[in-house]
Image (cartoon, helix red, strand yellow):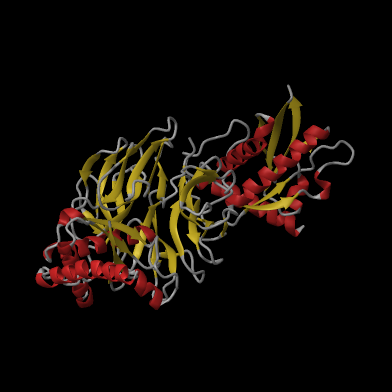
Amino acid sequence: MTSVKKITKRALYVPALLLLGACCTTRQPEPVPPPPPPAPVAPLGDIFFDFDRSGITPEGEAQLKQNAGWMVANTAKSVVIEGHCDERGTSEYNMALGQRRADSAMDAMVSLGADQARMTAISYGEEKPFDTGHDEAGWAQNRRAHFVEQ
Amino acid sequence: MRSTRNSFASLCLVLFGLLLMPLTLKAEEVGEYIAIRKTGASRIAIVLDKTAAKGDKESAWASSLNTAIKGGLDFTGLFNLMPAPLNIRNSQDGMLNLGSIASVGGDIYAGGSVTKKSGKPVLEMQVFDASGKSLLHRNYSGEESQLRAIGLRFCADLVELLTGKRSVFGTKIVFISNRTGNKEVYMCDFDGENVVQLTNSRSISLTPTVSSDGNYLAWMDYTSGRPNLYIKNLATGAKVSVNKHGVCISPAWRPGTNTLVTTLSYQGDQDLYLIRADGTVDRRLTKGGGIDVSPSFSPDGSKMAFVSTRQGGPHVFIQDMNSGQVRRLTYSGTYNTQPSWSPNGDKILYSSMQKSGEINIFSIGADGSGLLQLTSGSRNNEYPSWSPDGSMIVFSSTRGGKRKLYVMNADGTNQKPLLRMEGEQQQPSWSVNK
């Protein structure tokens, strides 16, 4: 009975040792290091304007550089640039002003290397305010070119 | 005695005024024209009698007619309405006692009766002056469902008789309301009655306007995902779009034509373009120099007022349609927009944003003279539009909080709400009725 147990144990040890030996002698291939993550692309951001103006401010220009970089990195994406105005002034004039802001932002984007064919400029005038406040804090939020990824 | 003497003096003034009136004023078929109302004159004191009726049906009709006539005459701001004095009829024979008109200070008496003929109402109206002279005697008939229109036809005749001009009665106003949660185009009668929703774009609709013949409606909305200008034939319902990328806003029909001018930006700047009723571009009217927007034509269509930033802030300019020559109209203020050229051709309304931030409506001569402020101290007053007869102005105001429509007389007096409607209303445009 004892001898049978021993034989069985040996029968199990031998393949186990063989297997262990095989594992020690065969070289496992080096794991391929994951590719380095791409440099982070800053997301799209909006730019803001002074009252009754469509010129790009220095802060706006910095943001547009970032947005142009996003366009270069995301060649399959397009962008709608919405021109917005605060509630002051009259609505038709603001509709024209909003277009001027959107166009102004798009022109600057093109000069910074963004593909014009993937951008559309649309004015919403004073029709879609981001901030419903009736003071300068609210108005400042609403005088913007809003970048929407498509 | 004093009132009799005053009445006699008034009559002499009226007759003297009659001698001075231009001969273009037409005579009526019953009674001859009298010129009581002159520019700057006070309101016409009119004794408005209740419409006589026999029978329940006729009495109900009379009540509706009284409401329509009283409301119509009151709306014009031309009249001082007075109830008939107790002694307006002789107690014995029931005949009119016209002497009682002058005794209560009335200039004019208007009254009549409604009868049933073939089941339909017939309104017989008579108008007398304080001396007892008949000025108008006419029947007005129609369907039972048209009592308001019947009463207003009399009002239209009376105003034309007394002023020599066409009246606002029968005209329409198109405007924008967000009643449904979206900005849609609506139309109502001259006095805010009978509101009808014209678009169901479920987007943002703006700047509706009807052609001078009443055949076409133009407006812009975002149903295609971007702003687009639409032109609809109101008789057939056929709709075309202008379909140019960029902004398209503030169309204005050129009087006497089926062409309109609107702002487009597909060639870069926000410039004014002449558009045919089929939506195609005829030609570009302005070029460069910033924003050009909000055109409004002189009544003969030869000149166009518009807003431009070519000299800095927004100001009103006038362009000759043939020569293309442009002159600046507004020099007062720094933000002047929304010109509206009067049907008489002599004045242009515009809205001006003032230093306080408040927007107010001004009137200026087409030659730049006679600047007059029509609204003040009542928050934002915008988008003035003349009634086709030039007697009234519709505009939007935030004086009560929300933006609502108001009307006023051409001189800025008699400012009052136009309609009661949920939500906000804006961009009214007064037009003829087709």
Which residue extends farthest right?
B92
Q: Quadrant of the N terminus of chain B?
A: bottom right
Residue drawn where x is 74% and y is 24% of the image: B119
Going by the image, does B260 lie left or right of B399? left
Nearer to us in this view, A86 or A91: A86
Nearer to us in this view, B155 or B219: B219
Residue A68, above or below B235: below
| Residue A147 visible in rendering | yes
Q: Quadrant of residue B314?
A: bottom left
Going by the image, does B51 lie left or right of A132? right
Which residue extends farthest top?
B118
Residue A134, above or below B306: below
Residue B60 image offset from top left, x and y in percent: 77, 38
Residue drawn where x is 74% and y is 48% of the image: B101
Residue B392 image offset from top left, x and y in percent: 51, 52
Going by the image, does B36 lie left or right of B4? left
Going by the image, does B61 lie left or right of A141? right
Nearer to us in this view, A50 or B145: A50
Q: Quadrant of residue B29?
A: top right
Report the number of discs.
Answer: 0
Residue A66 image offset from top left, x and y in percent: 19, 71
| Residue A31 visible in rendering | no
Residue B389 image offset from top left, x and y in percent: 48, 45
Residue B171, above or below B40: above
